[in-house]
Amino acid sequence: MRTSALARLIVMGALLVALLIPLNMVQSVVSERASRRGSVVDEIAATWGGVQTIGGPVLTVPFRYIENEAEGKSRVAQAFFLPEAFDVKGTMEPQVLERGLFKVVVYKARLALSGRFVRPDFTGIRPAAQPLWDDATLSVGVADPRGIAKRAVLKWNGGDVTLVPGVENSGLFSTGLRGAVGLVPSAADAGSLPFALDLEVNGSRELKLLPAGSETTVQLTSTWPHPSFIGTPLPAFRESSAAGFTGRWTVPYFGRGYPPRWTSIGSDVAQAKARADGSALGVGLLRPVDIYQQAERAVKYAALFIVMTFVVFFLWEIVRSRLLHPIQYLFVGFAMCVFYLLLVSISEHLGFDLAYASAAGATTLLIAGYSFHVLGGLMAGGIMGAGLITLYGFLYLLLRLEDYALLAGSVGLFAMLALLMFITRRVNWYDLRLGESAIGDQGSA
């Protein structure tokens, strides 16, 4: 059994199964650190501001209508109107906040909202509707009002309106700001009601906007070089570089998914909310490298890389008739497991690239030095070192080529298998005995 190739392969298989336990523990550590990072993001968002979605503005006009003609009972409902034109120009000033080892990308957004409403039209809503013009309000949605950085004043139809917390329940949003814009008959009959609002909000990760106008135009710029554009449609113009990004959207009425007016009667509010959820557009500020996501992807290749390393040692046993003990295989496997733990722990301090080079270099030197002694020679250590450099270089390539990782991985595995079959093409597996007797067997082959 000591010199049986089949027995050695069975032992190596058992060792690989055993090594899945520490690999699973490493995976748990990566998940725990990622979860902790997520908790820190939530903690910072609670004090700075979370993901912000800016909605509206929505003009709300209460109206009275006759619910029962026979009894003459009247009720008050609300009609909601969106602007004819809506324009947003904004800048996002990114900041990186740190708490312990964790870094979170946040931003301060300065938004200039402007546009115009047309005269609210009650035709077709209720034949006997009596608009209560004096009670009209205008609401602007802000997903996390805690992030509003300064007092907001609405310029409405030539005057100033101070906005206060709270919104009318239009369905598009549930939190934000509102102001009384009481429409006197002369204003209600006007052909156009212009508005403008400068809004400054703090947020984290993403900034989204709801298209509100029959024609909505949005322009967002920032000095952050790694944007992720959100929603449908994507910006008609988008540009990103090391200096920052610019995105411009133009959304017509048919592209937003909800009507220009609706009421609080029936299911209109619920339908508006359902359609608004899928209409938001905007941008997210990405970290260039998510160390925990990269580490998690790397661990998925761990078993394969351990197998390839074991195969190299096994081939050395065949070619050089040098017997290795299963414990020596186990030490090498543990060293490759520790690589992933080093990768995560060092990357939290030095960044992913430097951490990867440090962890891969340390692991390669350890296994190459160990091979020098147990395989008996400088050439053995050099070959193992070169093989590990190739493996870790290949893994780094897979982590970087996100879109082509599957293709690169498939081609790489095929090349490794082809090389393995070429090296062992003359081995007589039936008569193979590891150790000193293997030399004679291969010589006769």
Image (tube, grey):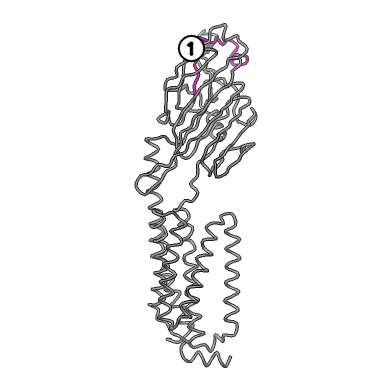
Residue occupying the point 52% across, 93% down = 440
Q: Which residue is mark 1?
A: 135
Q: Is residue 100 above or below residue 221?
A: below
State which region is magenta.
121-140
Q: Is residue 20 above or below residue 259?
A: below
Q: Farthest residue to the left: give it.
A: 100
Q: Is label 1 in a helix, a strand or a loop?
A: helix
Amino acid type indicated by mark 1 = Asp
- Residue 383 picture location, percent across and down: 50, 77
10 Å neighbourhood of mark 1: few (<14), some, or many (≥20)? some
Residue occupying the point 53% across, 43% down = 225
Residue 275 position by quadrant:
top right
- Residue 415 picture location, percent across and down: 60, 70
Q: Closer to the camera, 79 or 414?
A: 414
- Residue 31 picture location, percent across and down: 41, 54
Question: Is 175 part of what is drawn in magenta?
Answer: no
The quarter of the image holding the N terminus is bottom left
